[in-house]
Image (cartoon, rainbow, N blue to C red):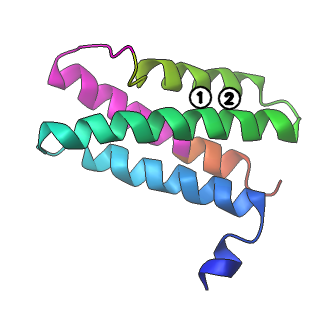
């Protein structure tokens, strides 16, 4: 079953997007600080991967590519941005929306 789920690059892309959506929505709950550090790493690399995938598929997804790169910049674990928890909750919900939209938008490519 897992082999069929990951049989095409598009299905891997959607799986990455859905995983980020779930992890970002869970980040609204109170977790140990290590969860948020791990989330930064996951969202950063997922955003870079997804932006490169959308860019490679062509089409009119330039704004989506730039939005994913902006998410990578915000969630950057190497030069972290320190903000209050309430602001991060907004960014986490926005990231969930962005990755959900990306999974929906590239659904047939």
Measured from the top left, where is residue 68 in percent x and y?
59, 28
Residue identifier under label 1: 68
Residue identifier under label 2: 64
Q: Main secondary structure of the magenta part?
A: helix
Instruction: Determine the secondary structure under disc 2.
Output: helix
Q: Are marks 1 and 2 in contact (CB under 8 Å)?
A: yes
In the foreground, 21 or 39: 39
Name the residue at 70% across, 45% down: 105
Name the residue at 66% across, 20% down: 66
Instruction: Kindly report the distance in space between the C-alpha atoms of the residues bearing marks 1 and 2.
Output: 6 Å
Label 2: few (<14), some (14–19) or many (≥20) C-alpha neighbours in 10 Å: some
Rendered image quadrant of residue 49:
top right
Give the residues drawn in magenta, as a range. Answer: 79-99
Name the residue at 48% across, 32% down: 44
* In this view, the mark in front (1 or 2): 1
Q: How many marks?
A: 2
Measured from the top left, where is residue 2 in percent x and y?
60, 79
């Amino acid at each position: 079953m897992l082999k069929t789920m990951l049989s095409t690059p598009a299905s891997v892309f959607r799986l990455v997007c859905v995983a980020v959506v779930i992890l970002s929505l869970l980040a609204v709950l109170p977790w140990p600080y290590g969860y948020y550090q791990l989330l930064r790493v996951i969202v950063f690399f997922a955003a870079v991967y997804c932006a490169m995938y959308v860019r490679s598929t062509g089409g009119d997804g330039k704004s989506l590519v730039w939005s994913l790169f902006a998410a990578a910049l915000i969630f950057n674990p190497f030069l972290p941005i320190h903000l209050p928890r309430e602001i991060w909750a907004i960014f986490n919900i926005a990231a969930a929306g962005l990755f959900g939209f990306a999974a929906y938008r590239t659904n047939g490519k």
